[in-house]
Each structure stands twice: as C-alpha cells, then as structure tokens.
Amino acid sequence: MKKIFINIILFLLLSSNLNAHVSHYKDFKKIEMEIFRNNELIGYNYYFFTKKNNEIQVTNQIKITVKLLGTIIFDVEGYGEEKYIDDKLISFNSKTKQNKKQKFVNLSLNEEKNRFIIKGSSFSGEANIKNVVGNWWNHKILQAESQISPVSGSIKKQVVTFVTKEKIELYGKSYEAERFTLKSKNLDLPDDKKLNFDIWLEKNTGLILKVKYSRMGDWEYRLKSFE
C-alpha cells in the first residue's frame, strides 16, 4: 500500500513538473534515436521540430531493417507530421510501409465537436482529444490514459506505472532517469497487440531516453543526440 501511494505521488509530481505542453519542446530542433534488436543496430527514429509564431510542427522519420541469414525478414519505413497550434494538436498525417504493406493515419481536429476525426488503416472514426499520438518524442505519452497508433490510427487504453529512479548511460553520457512501465489496460488483447514497454525519462529536459520491449527479440530505442 505504501509503495502504491509513493508511486501515485511521484507520478503526480512528474505531471506537475512537466506540464505536458508541446511548447516544452519549442527550443528543440532535432531528436535522434537509434533502434536496436538483440543489441544490434537495425534502424533509426528521427524527429525534427519547426516553429513559427504559435505553431509547432514535428516531423517523424523512421527506418527499420531486420535481416536473418542475409535475408530481410522485417522492413519498416515511415514518415509523419504532427501540427500543434497553441499546444493543441490540430492534425497528424503519416504513411508507413511495413513489409510491403501500406499503412496510414490522417487525423484532424474538428473544432466544433472538439473531437479528433481519424481515418486510418486500422481505425476510422472520432476520438477524444485527450488521446496522444504514440511517438517517443513526447513525454505526454506517460500522462495519457490512451494513445493513437502513429502507424495505423488504432486507439489503445494504457496504464502507466512509476517503477524507480536510476542512473543510465547512453553513448558515453550519464543520465538521472525515472523509469516507468506502460502497458495495455485491456489484458485480453492478443500478445502482439498489447502495449508493454519500459520507458526511461529525464525529467529536467522532458526527454524520453530509452524505450525497451520484447517482441520477437529484445528491442530498444535509445536517445543518441538532440539539439
């Protein structure tokens, strides 16, 4: 009971300190993450930030190639754009090619309904504006109750739990990190559809340092650099 209480307090403090505003990233130009599978470099995930007055645009590029005995068994290449005005998500559009299969998301904000309108390869319909696009640049994903897949537009409810504070090292740099788990709220989902991540966050910068999960191997997204 005591541990649960401490976790709740720490999570509330995190939410309060980070404020969950996109403008938190207004001074960033780029975030670079490298992607590893079984400790082997297999790709990258880059985010580029463009600011103009009260508008912020975040461009996402991802490329993953997994080979087995010289043959490509998993290949992903994607591009996406998130547009925010006054910290409010106005639109998100992405195209992703996964093993020659095309996936997409077209999201827009309906101002009158105050709802997201989504047309995606896995879901089409309306969604609550409290949903967060599930990209790893945005620490707000740790404060949301549900997320929108940046690949297909599907919506999954989630549970985020604070685990511990710990020091981690990436590319020769040491960070004081806070570790969380992010899991699907619906435990009846098939294993390949469940959210099940370990996430390390640096609170001072609001940067997600590392993301780890297991699915046909041990995967990690690691923060390489930012500016």
Image (cartoon, grey):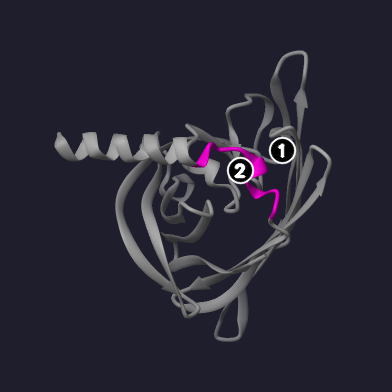
Question: Residue 142's spot in the image, x, y percent?
Answer: 47, 42
Q: Residue 120 carries which label?
A: 1
Mark 1 secondary-structure assignment: strand
Q: How far apart are marks 1 and 2 (CA)?
A: 9 Å
Contact (Cβ within 8 Å) of mark 1 with mark 2: yes
Image position of 192 (left or right of 79)? left
Q: How crowded is mark 2: few (under 14 residues within 10 Å), some or many (20 or more)?
A: some
Q: Which of 120 and 176 is in front in this view?
A: 176
Which contiguous range is marked in magenta?
A: 18-27
In which quadrant of the rendered image does the N terminus lie? Answer: top left
Mark 2 secondary-structure assignment: loop
Image position of 208 with respect to 4: above or below: below
Residue bearing the label numbered 2: 149
Q: Residue at x 72, y 31 (%)?
A: 118
Q: Nearer the viewer, residue 226 or 27?
A: 27
Under mark 2, the amino acid is: Ser
